[in-house]
Structures are given as structure tokens and as C-alpha cells.
Amino acid sequence: MKRVLWAIMLLFVFSSAGFAQPPDTAYVGLFTDINHTTFSVMHPGGAPLPFTMYIFWLAPAVGINAVEFMIVYPANIIASTVTPNPAITVNLGSLSAGMSSAWGPEDCQAAGVWVESHHQACFLMNMDQTIIELAPHPTAGGPQIASCELGYPIYPAKKFTNLCLNSDCSYAAPNTTWGAIKSLF
């Protein structure tokens, strides 16, 4: 019996490394915290509510060297100061008109790691339910990344989340199958 338990324990130890593999696809999300866990803001009423929006990318197995995307703001948001990641060496455009940003060639963003590309000070003006949305760069497409591979080939990035304003962003999935859930990863 002890041998069976040891065999099962070793199986879990050695097979768990397979679950830690970086994704095949890049993901991008809008968050309200540096830990990239919260993606909604609730206005309590009254004065404009200041908050910070963080743009995080999950690097796929090929890493991330550059990103292209755009942010669409609803009418109840005043977007303010944008701060890029200090390791970004090139920023072209703006978040609202289309942003192209690149890290230096020696600063490839590691596979399987969430990395912040930008954060922005914003003000939520009222209690209307709206969404700050990730969108394709108007001239380049996307959201997309340039990988760290030779020649920096471009790959699409999947939206992980937009930023919900005055709602909790609950997504119901009443008829989801296991196959549909696996296809997300």
C-alpha cells in the first residue's frame, strides 16, 4: 500500500510541471490593480471617482517584444496621464488612437508571465454602466504582439477582460461544455 501511495505522490509531483507551461496564445486585459485581479470600478455617487487602469499582457511560449492595441473609452470616463512600463523603449501613438509599444531587443518579456505595458489615471464621472474596451489598432490590427523569435513575427492576442464600470462583469455560461472551456486555453 505504501508503494502505491508513493507512486501516486511521485506521479503528481512530476506531472505538475506540465500544468505550468506557458500558454500558446498571448492574452491582454484591463485591470484596476497592480496584481491584475480586479477588472471593474464602481462609482459611489457624487464627485468624479479617480482610479488607475492597468494594461497587462500574458506572454505566450514565444515571449513578447512588442504590442499593438487601442482603448475605446465610454463617455463617462475622463482619461488622463498614461505611464508606460519603464522598460519600453518605443511608444508610437496614443491609447485612444492606437498604441504601438516595444521593449528593447534584450528585454524580451518572459513566456507565461503577466507584464504591464501601461497604466493610466482615469476618472469615472457617474454611475452609468459602461465598459472601457480593448480594440484593434486602427492601422495595424490586433490586439497583437510581436514575439521574441528571430524576425519578431506577429501573433494575435486574445482579450482576457475589458474594464467594467458600475457593474461586476459577471459572465454567465449556462450551456458551457468541457470542450468549450478547454478551448479557452
Image: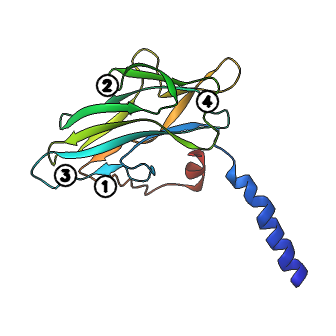
Q: Amino acid at mark 4?
A: Asp
Nearer the observer: mark 1 or 3; the answer is 3
Q: Amino acid at mark 3?
A: His
Which percent across, then down, holds residue 1? 88, 85
Residue drawn at (63%, 23%) of the image: 105
Disc number for residue 43: 3
- Per the image, the residue denoted by label 1 is 168
Residue drawn at (47%, 28%) of the image: 143
- Per the image, the residue denoted by label 4 is 107
Q: Residues within 10 Å of mark 4 (few under 14, many from 20)?
A: some
Report the front residue among 130 and 150. Answer: 150
Q: Residues within 10 Å of mark 1 (few under 14, many from 20)?
A: some
Distance from label 2 to label 3 (Cα)?
A: 22 Å
Q: Earlier in the sequence, mark 1 or mark 3?
A: 3
Disc number for residue 46: none
Which percent across, then down, holds residue 74? 23, 34
